[in-house]
Amino acid sequence: MKKRSIFLAALAAVMIAAGTVGSAWAYFTTYAEAQGGYPISLGDETRIEEEFSDWTKHIAITSAEDSEPAYIRVKAFSGSEYTLVYSDASGKWTPGEDGYYYYADIVEGGQTTEPLDVKIENIPEDAKDFNVIVIHESTPVQYDEDGKPYADWNIKLDSGEVEGGNQ
Amino acid sequence: MMRKVKEFIKSPKATAISFGLAMLLLLFSSVGGARAAVSYISEYYTTRVQMDNIGVTLMENGNEISSRDYKSSSDGTWDENTGKLLQGMLGDDKQVKLGKRYKEELCVKNSGTIDQYVRVNVYKYWLDKDGEKQRDLSPKLIGLNFVNLGSDWLIDEESSTTERTVLYYSKLLKSGDTSSLFADTLAIDSAIGTKVTQTTKKEGKYTTITTTFDYDGVQFCVEARVDAVQDHNAADAIWSAWGRKVQVNNGTLSLQ
């Protein structure tokens, strides 16, 4: 009889407790979500195009199709035996303090720069070969917080060099 | 006298009376629900249900992007709309410009009919060309600029990781109101250009050094999920729904 009383009392307690479960779980909640993104393109490939005539190298840099916009600079080395004189008809090549010539425009994929002429002077009369090395470098266009483009030459996309030549 | 009371308590009669009282209590506890069910179709009840609709909307640059609102018809269904973030971000740009700060103003609107507390989970990550998540690329380079921190929005440092940031709105968001911004701009760090692999190729007179960028072709992703919970018994509701201990004093939420 005593066991039955305890059982009934426990049953009643459980039933009352169970009656409150519903309200404990009845919290109102909801959610909303969204996502988005864009691909990043950084790849670039540039190639030097060079013609040689009258002891002058006519240098132009071509950016491969689908390449990202880039800035380009060029520098030539000849050692001490020759003198190199730079010139360009377009006025888009500007000398820097580091000896590089910087192209003013951003070069898009598939575009070619205006030519930069490098004339080799003080050539010995009997000279047939010479050794002048031309280096070009490109860097991806960077942007400041306002979207204004600039070049960071610590980040180089592509670089190359060509040497030698004969008249 | 005490002896009689003790004898009565021990008697089966007392047990039966106690059980009867318990049943009565149980019966009364269900009367409310039954009454509510009866008045479900009444005008009074309909009004009451409309007051209890919860809803939340994720806002981007003043536009509603995604929402989930309990329907006013109270038939257990929701008005749901899931949009996409960053759709108009580029403007006239053909592609993402590294380092440029793009406008990305994010906030939350209470589109329900009850006041609520909200939190936001923001995920930033990289996907490869096949859409697989790239865990070795750093989410830190996806610069979503969080604002109004400490005052309006609280970062849950315990739950946040490099990829996920959890923010709690400390204020009660009233029905129809919009929170302050939790982010205002997005910029991809130009430092991704420093993660490179170089190869050298010599062809005749030409030597070409090609730099391959580790991040070339990958896609950055930003994901935001807004959670909302009723203001009534908010601390218990948040603990129950989100598993986070919080304090709510005079309507202001703080993390424990």
Image: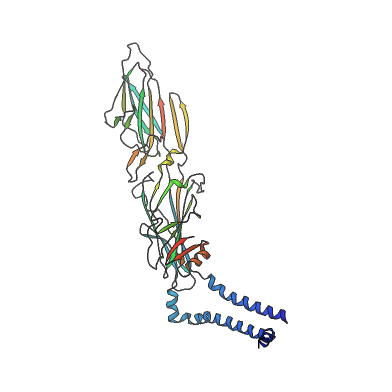
Where residue A145 appears, as percent x and y from the top left, is 34, 45
Q: Residue at (56%, 74%) from the top-left corner?
A: A20
Dividing the image into 4 quarters, which one contains the N terminus of chain B? bottom right
Q: Residue at (37%, 36%) from the top-left corner?
A: A152
Query: A119 and B192: which one is in front?
Result: B192
Where residue A105 appears, as percent x and y from the top left, is 31, 36
Q: Name, please, the residue furthest toward the top.
A: A126
Tally the numbered discs.
Answer: 0
Q: Residue at (52%, 64%) from the top-left corner?
A: B239
**In this figure, which colouring scheme has been used for the structure?**
rainbow
Where residue A160 appears, as percent x and y from the top left, is 41, 29
Where residue B146 appears, as percent x and y from the top left, is 40, 53
Q: Residue at (53%, 65%) from the top-left corner?
A: B240
Is B1 above or below relative to A114?
Answer: below
Judged left or right of residue B127, residue B175 is left
Please tell me in which quadrant of the rendered image residue B83 appears.
bottom left
Is B63 above or below relative to A102?
Answer: below
Is B23 above or below relative to B239?
Answer: below
Query: B188 and B165: which one is in front?
Result: B165
Please tell me in which quadrant of the rendered image residue B147 appears.
bottom left
